[in-house]
Amino acid sequence: MANRMILNETAWFGRGAVDALTDEVTRRGYHKALIVTDKTLVQCGVVDKVTSRMDAAGLAWEIYAGVIPNPTISVVQEGLKVFTQSGADYLIAIGGGSPQDTCKAIGIISNNPEFADVRSLEGLSPTRKPSVPIMAIPTTAGTAAEVTINYVITDEEKRRKFVCVDPHDIPQAAFIDADMMDGMPPALKAATGVDALTHAIEGYITRAAW
């Protein structure tokens, strides 16, 4: 039986990978980004590593820093509103799994407004249009959300998480840059390392991992 593999159009890997962001954006003809991230990454200067490069290249951007760990439906809805009002035509996800997942949900709903109820995306999502273009910049090394078609959202009312699986949500480009991860606390490095190891083991022991 054949296995289907869905990959990013482009993935930059290694120290300095983020340097390629501005060329990727320019080559693709995008005009303004909404950066989806969290307040901590803004405050500690991680996001500035990206925005300073964009400023130097004359690229427009705006920030939505309302992401929280285990992002909720209301966070997605707020981010979607900011994206709509910003006039942006693409998204940049900066962070670990939570900003990446929030960004995917925003991008999918923006181009598939019939799924405005985030809960309707649970499981294998039946969307018809690709997400708004996403440039993904991870700041942890565990979730692999920047190169996968899955995202997880929390339903705060029902106190449950749900998984969305959608080939339309994979980022157009990913920039896996160790320079963006150097500031991770030791505990977070360990946790994300175990996360990555667990996914690798999963690939060996279950066919469902495909």
Image (tube, helix red, strand yellow):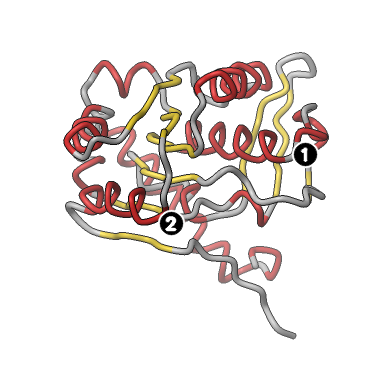
Query: What percent of the width, then of the height, locates residue 146?
Result: 46, 49
Q: Quadrant of the N terminus?
A: bottom right
The three-letter code of the residue at mark 2 reads: Leu
Count of numbered tags: 2
93 to 209, vertically: above or below:
above
Near-viewer residue (24 or 188): 24
Q: Residue at x 49, y 39 (%)?
A: 90
Checking the image for residue 200, the label placed there is none
Q: Residue at x 33, y 50 (%)?
A: 26
Pointer 2 local density, CA inside 10 Å: few below 14, some 14–19, many at least 20: few
* SS type, badge 2: helix
167 to 119, vertically: above or below:
below
The image quadrant of residue 62 is top left
Residue furthest to the bottom in view is 1
Q: Quadrant of the C terminus?
A: bottom right
Choose the circle earlier in sequence order: 2 or 1. Answer: 1
Residue labelled with disc 2? 197
The image quadrant of residue 148 is bottom right
Pointer 1 local density, CA inside 10 Å: few below 14, some 14–19, many at least 20: many
For discs 2 and 1, the disc positioned in front in the rendered view: 1
Query: What percent of the width, then of the height, locates residue 11?
Result: 38, 61
In this rendering, position of residue 52 left or right of residue 1: left
Near-viewer residue (7 or 23): 23
Residue labelled with disc 1? 121
Q: Residue at x 39, y 43 (%)?
A: 192
Gap in angstroms between the C-alphas marked 2 and 1: 28 Å
Query: What percent of the width, then of the height, locates residue 122?
Result: 78, 40
